[in-house]
Amino acid sequence: MEYVGAALLGFAGGTVGGLLGVGGGILFVPALAIFLNESQIRAEATSLLAIVPVAMAGAWRQNRFGNVRVRDGLIVGALSPLGVLIGVEVSNAVSQRTLELGFAALLLFVAGQFFRRALAARQPGEPRTRGRARARP
Amino acid sequence: MIGTAAGAFSGMFGVGGGTVIVPLLVLWFGYGERVATGTSLLAIVVIGALAAAGQGLHGNVDIAEGVLIGIPAVGGVIFGTGLQQRLPERAISLLFALLLVAIATELIIP
């Protein structure tokens, strides 16, 4: 039964991933913790593994729709290792509850941004200029 | 800077970093929703693999379960990306926001 649950969770998470451009972790983590009784840290770590094939397939599909800026995507990925290292160490140092609340805060923060975007009036065919990369700290 | 921030969130919270990358690409670089999500997915491949390896070194990764979830998820993601081309961007944003609030509420209530 647990296998069926995990497989269903995988499919649902993948659908959300493809739809929203997230790896599915946003669904995998809470679902692993809530339905499959993993601790928060194990749910997060296991989710990371599941994300990799999802993101691969998603990027491949999106590329066929012309939605991937390959160079930018690779640059973002290439600049991540320092952050990854910090994140992994912090997540293993703090308590489970802290991690849960931090995860919830992250979700609410991102949700707020998307609510603003969804509610902001915009012309459907409005051209979007790509901001030139200004020097950022 | 997006890469570093996304990497930190990924390693800490077990997400691929898309929750950080997509809004930042949209807000800072003026990407449309679809190009932001597509580009973000590519970055997530790299970030997710690195973060999974990092958590693996701490012994936190349940490999069997990760594979069990990851394989059917590939089917889901193909379905999801196809669906995305047919939905308006605003609806997608709203859906995403609602989903996040629901999950956050569930997590906050002990």
Image: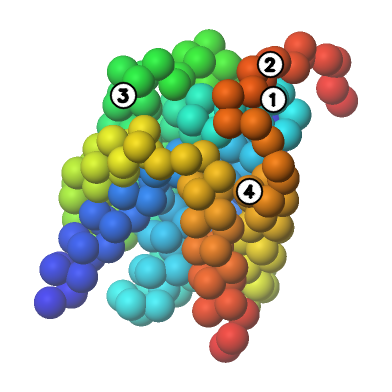
Q: Which residue is mark 3?
A: A60
Q: Which residue is mark 1?
A: B30
Between tags 1 and 4, which lies in front? 4
Point 58% across, 31% down: residue: A124
For mark 1, name the chain. B
Q: Quadrant of the N terminus of chain B?
A: top right
Mark 4 Cα shell of 10 Å, populated few (<14), some (14-19), many (≥20): some
The residue shown at (84%, 22%) is A136
Tag 2 near tag 1, CB within 8 Å = yes
- SS state under label 2: loop
Given residues B27 and A129, the one toward you in this image is A129
Sequence-earlier tag: 4 or 3: 3
Local secondary structure at mark 1: loop
Q: Position of residue A91 (x, y in %)?
A: 61, 59
Mark 4 lies on a secondary structure that is: helix
* Mark positioned earlier in the residue sequence (4 or 2): 4
| Residue at point 45%, 28% (across, down) | B38
Q: Residues within 10 Å of mark 2 (few under 14, many from 20)?
A: few
Question: Label 4, on which residue?
Answer: A118
One can see residue A1 in this view: yes
Q: Is residue A70 above or below residue B18?
A: above
The kind of residue tagged 4 is: Ala
Which residue lies under the disc numbered 2? A130
